[in-house]
Amino acid sequence: MDNREVVLRLSDITMQFGGVVAVDNLNLDVHKNEIVGLIGPNGAGKTTAFNCITGVYEPTNGSVEINGKVVIENHPQGKMKEAYKGRNAGKYTKAITMLPDKVTKLGVARTFQNIRLFKGMTVMENVMVAMHMNQTESVFGATFRSKKARTEEAAMRAEAEELLRKVDLYENRNDLSTSLPYGKQRHLEIARALATHPSILLLDEPAAGMNPQESDDLMKFIGRIRDEFDLSILMIEHHMQVIMGICEHIYVLNYGGQIADGTPAEIQANPAVIEAYLGGDE
């Protein structure tokens, strides 16, 4: 029995679009300070699962718990009652929704498959934008530069500088984000997520487009920020060297369904996983 603290739990998460079930009955736990992988072929439903966690999508069925509290829950409603193809249709009775900004304030931050930096902003400005979610001054005070607003901005700038030092981007703080090498742009995107003070970090294909050396550097970077920022991490990744090299537990999706979970060694030897990636005999 695993007695570690569960910080993120997905229970029977199903996401159906019309007649297409993109995620079918996903059950997943992330423990405190654990790095967990979510893998599967293209179109398996991985990013859809992230969108259910972060409030971008309202799941058709199932629940999302953050630090032991159910923050998202749903069940088939309206026309979906008849069209629903998933399981556990009668298990959940509440409709609890949470918008992405509220999920972020609960300590969940994410990055995206395609880098989404603010292209016209500097490295420092990209990080400071994320920090404004924790600003307490009113819009009026911020607009007219009240003493409180100036004090808060100075504190945010100092915090942003310290964060950039920790992620080795301080020397680039005044550079445009798009002028950075590709690997550093990925680091900046993660740094921007860290600026929201998360306890749970969702990484969507952070190694996409990286060469082997950049991927190796990324593994070390993710391990370091997990320890330094006391994070729990759930990551989607197609780069198997990264997933197998850094994750402690891995969940596998195929055609929206969960086909396996276990340690990296167990996943590598699992016949269902091998067939999903390589195909079976005709």
Image: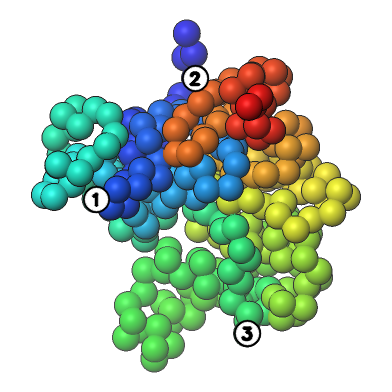
Say what amino acid the circle numbered 3 marks: Gly
Residue shown at the point (70%, 23%) measured from the top left: 268
* Apparent side of residue 50 relative to residue 279 in the rendered image (left or right): left
Quarter residue 181 falls in: bottom right
Q: Nearer the viewer, residue 166 or 69?
A: 69
Mark 2 and mark 1: Cα distance apart in space? 27 Å
Considering only order in the chain, which callout, 3 or 2, is on the residue closer to the N terminus?
A: 2
Q: Which mark is residue 97?
A: 1
Residue shown at the point (29%, 48%) measured from the top left: 19
Considering only order in the chain, which callout, 1 or 3, is on the residue closer to the N terminus?
A: 1
Work out whether 252 lies above or below 165.
above
Where disc 1 sits, the SS reads: loop
* Apparent side of residue 279 relative to residue 216 in the rendered image (left or right): left
* Residue 82 at x, y percent in the picture: 14, 42
Mark 2 and mark 3: Cα distance apart in space? 43 Å
Work out whether 145 lies above or below 48.
below
Task: Pick out the residue farthest to the bottom.
Answer: 144
Task: Pick out the residue farthest to the right.
Answer: 213
Where disc 2 sits, the SS reads: loop
Task: List the residue tagged with mark 3.
Answer: 120
Q: Which mark is residue 4?
A: 2
* Apparent side of residue 167 relative to residue 201 in the rendered image (left or right): right
* Residue 83 at x, y percent in the picture: 20, 44
Q: Quadrant of the C terminus?
A: top right
Asked if one can make out residue 41 in the rendered structure from this viewpoint, the answer is yes
Where disc 3 sits, the SS reads: loop
The crowding category of the residue bearing disc 2, from other C-alpha atoms within 10 Å (few below 14, some 14 to 19, many at least 20), is: few
Mark 3 and mark 1: Cα distance apart in space? 33 Å
Residue shown at the point (60%, 58%) measured from the top left: 113
Q: Are marks 2 and 1 in contact (CB under 8 Å)?
A: no
